[in-house]
């Protein structure tokens, strides 16, 4: 399919039909058409993405217009007799799944049931007449994972183990010709059964994690077993695990893929590997740590296809987005993003750079490591072995005539001082710090030894952010909660009164379904706290004021705290009380 999205290239005429049906407004249609004209894409996809119409609502409308059945697959059980006709790689590539078979006719749920080319290919491949029906992109992806992926992971592992001989216990080396940088297609290896059992095992673990939209894979040694866990939406989940006797062989395979020293088991190692799965290139950042029972591996999955580069997609509140956008347009100064590992700092920085990436702007970055490659931006990776650090790279950048500089992380006085020098000589600088909140960044800079007048004259804003899990839209339900419970959460009575519905406080939660693996959550959304450095804040920085005083002044000036941002997401039906408490427990006065 030329472009993944909502089904077909809906014409302006059909858009006008949506308006006349009252499903969208003329203003919404005009905005979506402008977006389509500027950046391409399918009109239906844009309308759903902007939240102007629900995906299933649009599908139902298209079904009536084109006389093609729309199938709600959420509660459907698909028979094996239909599933086995279309291979998994074809189902994933074209975003479709066979849902039924009757005599010589195969019923197929598709994102784009009007795509004649795919229909002809399916008929030729299967030998069946194809009856296409509309299916939701989300439902199809979930069904593929349910019937091909999640269901088969344990079975596939058991099958690998059945074929494995006892001799594999002592394996520590795998063919070194398969070194880092190769683009092995894991699906092909599994389908053909050509890979050795250990290679198959590793392929299965990685491909399952990618299909589950995991951000990290943990392979941990125990004294009696090996544990495999995926971090999905910020939370670790146990997975089918291989026996303990295969642990060393799995670690060796991962080291070879990442060009690490397989004989070194006493020291930590870090590496990187590039893979190909489902026609997508995936980067793995691999960290190996020696533990008592053996070596532990954590792999960070970097999938550029899931990278959001539009500021509007990051969850900024309107007030925060206005401040953020204003500081991006400043001619010089320092913008900082703070938060713990995995809070989305890199995505926010990449989105900012993508917004400013124009032919007449010279953007350079120094990162450790480069997480995603951005077209048109000069990216440099730290290499401490040859003396290329954040500070030395930043000094070199100043001789490269940059307009905008991004430093992956400011860790010490030298890097901070060089960044301040760059800002004072007319450059716009972006970087990250590890602090709990936005005002805390000012204290952290002071602890590095930077003079307050330098901080006050160069710092533009500090963004603190976290990620909260989003409620699964497929199983979302509403419920009433007592006002006193919300007041204990830090919600003001005025806010409750403004957001009450008929005098009742109505919130949302997920019941749990196959699409969200019974968790009630699917995906994550950002919450943000932005400290804009205005004259009042500059004065407090000069005075070396306590962080509490800076935070109090910022709140009086309109700063939304992390807890307040999360509460807004809560009342918008995007997340739950449990998530607000889990992620913002430290953000309490």
Image (spheres, helix red, strand yellow):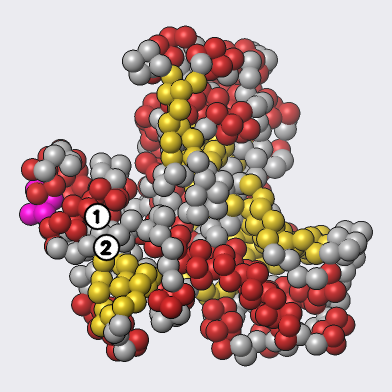
State which tag comes first along the sequence, 2 or 1: 1
Secondary-structure class at tag 1: helix
Marks 2 & 1, CB-CB < 8 Å contact: yes
Q: Is residue 1 magenta?
A: no
Residue 495, percent from left and from top: 43, 14
- Vertical position of residue 243 compared to residue 293: above or below: below
Q: Residue at position x 49%, y 35% from top?
A: 509
* Label 1 neighbour load within 10 Å: few <14, some 14-19, many 20+: many
Tag 2 residue: 134
| Quadrant of the image containing the N terminus | bottom left
Residue 559, given in percent of the width and then of the height, sits at 48, 20
Q: Quadrant of residue 283?
A: bottom right
- Magenta portion: prevailing SS class: helix
Percent coordinates x, y for residue 358 in the rendering: 34, 53
Task: Give the extent of the magenta segment.
Answer: 12-16
Mark 2 and mark 1: Cα distance apart in space: 7 Å
**Disc 2: CA contacts within 10 A as few (<14), some (14-19) or many (>=20):** many
Q: Residue at label 1?
A: 59
Q: Nearer the viewer, residue 197 or 180?
A: 197
Q: Quadrant of residue 302?
A: bottom right
Q: Nearer the viewer, residue 22 or 188?
A: 22
Residue 479 picture quarter: top left
* Residue in the foreground of this view, choosing between 238 and 389: 238
């Amino acid at each position: 399919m030329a472009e993944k999205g909502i089904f077909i290239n809906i014409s302006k005429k059909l858009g006008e039909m949506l308006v006349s049906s009252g499903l969208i407004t003329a203003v919404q249609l005009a905005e979506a058409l402008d977006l389509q004209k500027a950046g391409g894409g399918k009109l239906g996809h844009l309308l759903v993405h902007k939240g102007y119409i629900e995906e299933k609502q649009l599908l139902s409308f298209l079904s009536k217009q084109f006389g093609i059945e729309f199938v709600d697959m959420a509660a459907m059980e698909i028979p094996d007799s239909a599933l086995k006709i279309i291979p998994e790689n074809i189902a994933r590539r074209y975003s479709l799944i066979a849902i039924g078979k009757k005599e010589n006719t195969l019923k197929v749920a598709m994102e784009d049931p009007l795509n004649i080319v795919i229909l002809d290919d399916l008929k030729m491949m299967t030998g069946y007449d194809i009856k296409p029906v509309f299916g939701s992109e989300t439902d199809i992806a979930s069904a593929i994972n349910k019937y091909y992926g999640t269901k088969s992971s344990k079975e596939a592992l058991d099958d690998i183990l059945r074929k494995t001989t006892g001799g594999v216990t002592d394996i520590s080396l795998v063919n070194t010709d398969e070194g880092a940088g190769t683009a092995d297609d894991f699906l092909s290896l599994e389908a053909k059964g050509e890979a050795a059992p250990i290679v198959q095992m590793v392929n299965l673990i990685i491909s399952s994690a990618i299909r589950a939209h995991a951000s990290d894979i943990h392979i941990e040694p125990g004294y009696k077993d090996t544990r495999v866990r995926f971090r999905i939406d910020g939370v670790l989940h146990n997975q089918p695990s291989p026996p303990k006797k295969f642990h060393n062989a799995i670690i060796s395979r991962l080291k070879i893929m990442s060009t690490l020293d397989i004989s070194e088991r006493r020291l930590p190692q870090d590496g990187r590997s590039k893979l190909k799965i489902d026609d997508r290139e995936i980067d793995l950042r691999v960290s190996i740590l020696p533990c008592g029972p053996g070596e532990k591996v954590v792999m960070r999955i970097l999938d550029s296809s899931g990278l959001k580069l539009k500021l509007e997609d990051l969850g900024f509140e309107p007030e925060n987005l206005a401040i953020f956008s204003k500081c991006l347009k400043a001619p010089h100064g320092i913008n900082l993003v703070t938060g713990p590992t995995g809070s989305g700092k890199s995505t926010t920085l990449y989105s900012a750079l993508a917004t400013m990436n124009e032919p007449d702007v010279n953007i350079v970055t120094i990162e450790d490591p480069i997480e995603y490659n951005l077209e048109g931006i000069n990216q440099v990776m730290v290499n401490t072995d040859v003396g290329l650090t954040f500070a030395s790279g930043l000094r070199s950048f100043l001789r490269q005539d940059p307009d905008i500089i991004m430093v992956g992380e400011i860790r010490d006085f030298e890097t901070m001082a060089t960044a301040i020098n760059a800002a004072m000589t007319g450059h716009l600088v972006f970087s990250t710090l590890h602090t709990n909140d936005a005002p805390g960044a000012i204290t952290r800079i002071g602890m590095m030894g930077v003079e307050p007048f330098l901080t006050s004259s160069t710092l533009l804003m500090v963004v603190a952010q976290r990620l909260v899990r989003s409620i699964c839209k497929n199983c979302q339900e509403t419920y009433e909660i007592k006002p006193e419970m919300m007041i204990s959460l830090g919600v003001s009575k005025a806010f409750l009164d403004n957001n009450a519905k008929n005098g009742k406080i109505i919130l949302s939660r997920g019941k749990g379904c196959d699409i969200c693996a019974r968790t009630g959550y699917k995906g994550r959304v950002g919450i943000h706290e932005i400290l804009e450095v205005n004259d009042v804040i500059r004065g407090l920085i000069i005075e070396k004021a306590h962080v509490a005083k800076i935070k109090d002044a910022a709140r009086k000036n309109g700063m939304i705290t992390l807890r307040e941002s999360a509460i807004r997401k809560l009342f918008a039906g995007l997340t739950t009380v449990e998530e607000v408490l889990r992620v913002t427990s430290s953000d309490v006065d």
